[in-house]
Amino acid sequence: MPQKINLFRIPMRGPGDVSGLASLLDSGEIAAADIVAILGKTEGNGGVNDFTREYASMSLANLLASRMRCNVEAVEKRVALVMSGGTEGVLSPHMSVFARSRVDDKIGGGKRLAIGVAQTREFLPEELGRQAQIDETAKAVREAILDAEIGVEDVHFVQIKCPLLTSERVESARARGHEPVTDEAYASMAYSRGASALGVAVALGETRADVGEAELLRDWSVYSCVASTSAGIELTRSVIVVMGNSASAAGELIIGHAVMRDAIDLAGVLDAFASVGLNGDRGLDAVSAGRVVNVFAKAEPSTDGSIRGFRHTMLDDSDITPTRHARAAVGGVIAGVAGSGAIYVSGGAEHQGPMGGGPIAVVARAEV
């Protein structure tokens, strides 16, 4: 029986606001048992101490537990809860709810959206940013691809939520005689995101199979064109969501992607929309905008301190972290085409697209 994916973009009034999802569950438009992943954008700072992510995750887990008549732990094992903090600029807090069901027959031709989810094992603090994280991530990505029932060539976006280091986790490693990759919590986010992205690249054959720690945060020529990784304090394992198109999948949704070469790469944004048959050269018209279900993208300030020959100050601002600047900039470029700020833009794109750029994927309703 082919799988059918429905995706719902639901506005949020705050990180604990699950009323929109509750209404859809009450109406029967979504069955709680069909939900396999929820990607949320919350209005926190996106840093180590961004507790809006955990607040949103717990609020969603509690809601689903009550509807599925199970405990929160069972929900967290079954549903990929990926919360990304930071809605700077025009970005708007919202959640993307993926529901997967089985139908008797596939109606219509062409490939349609399919998704798969998987989780790594729990990581020890000293494994973050190291070969173990790369290898375990690659393994879990392969499992998610099998769960999605798609081929590697049909993968268009891989969303990962991965752990970070805290002072407590650093000390626990040292108490056992192990030294973590860094003792700085903020720096650990980059290591974890980068290791996760390299795991995606290895799993999809985008780079050499032996790429590992030697390249991590050093060789920016090694990257994945479809990885989107986000680090958070709220978990100690990684959660993976693979999105792609399958000839056996049913439904009306398709996904396409492109790669932004830098933070102002409008051409890359337009290519992403074109990959699902949408012309955004003058911004999407009302009909085309109505076909878009959501946009997922990465944002990163270039580490050389310039964009197309002009100096930027994102890396030198003591008041606002670089990833917050990048999310606002990239969010504005994409929103100007999409006609909406309710898009998923995640900061910190180490090994996710070329240095200073990042992948962008569009989920839309297929033309009939």
Image (cartoon, helix red, strand yellow):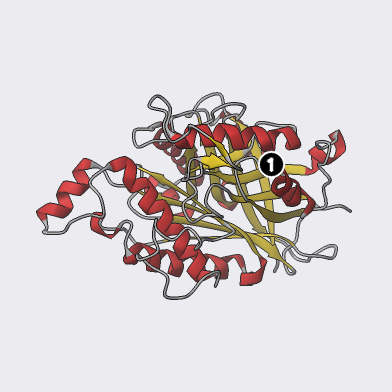
Q: Is residue 139 something one can see in this rendering?
A: yes
Pinpoint residue 269: horizontal percent, then vertical percent. Answer: 70, 45
The quarter holding residue 287 reads top right
Residue 93 vertical position relative to residue 220 in the rendered view, above or below: above
The quarter holding residue 108 reads bottom right
The total number of labels drawn is 1
Residue farthest to the right, as pictured:
368
Mark 1 neighbour density, 10 Å: few (under 14) some (14–19) many (20 or more): few
133 to the left or right of 182: right
Quadrant location of the N terminus in the rendered image: bottom right
Q: Between residue 92 and residue 31, name the one nearer to us.
A: 92
Residue 231 vertical position relative to residue 310 in the rendered view, above or below: below
The quarter holding residue 45 reads top left
Type of amino acid under label 1: Glu
Pinpoint residue 256: horizontal percent, then vertical percent. Answer: 71, 56
Residue 286 vertical position relative to residue 151 in the rendered view, above or below: above
Secondary structure at numbered mark 1: loop
Q: Residue at image x 35%, y 65%?
A: 213
Pinpoint residue 291: horizontal percent, then vertical percent. Answer: 80, 43
Residue of label 1: 29
Q: Residue at image x 68%, y 55%?
A: 257
Q: Between residue 133 and residue 283, name the one nearer to us.
A: 283
Residue 88 vertical position relative to residue 118 in the rendered view, above or below: above
Pinpoint residue 305: horizontal percent, then vertical percent. Answer: 48, 40
150 to the left or right of 236: right
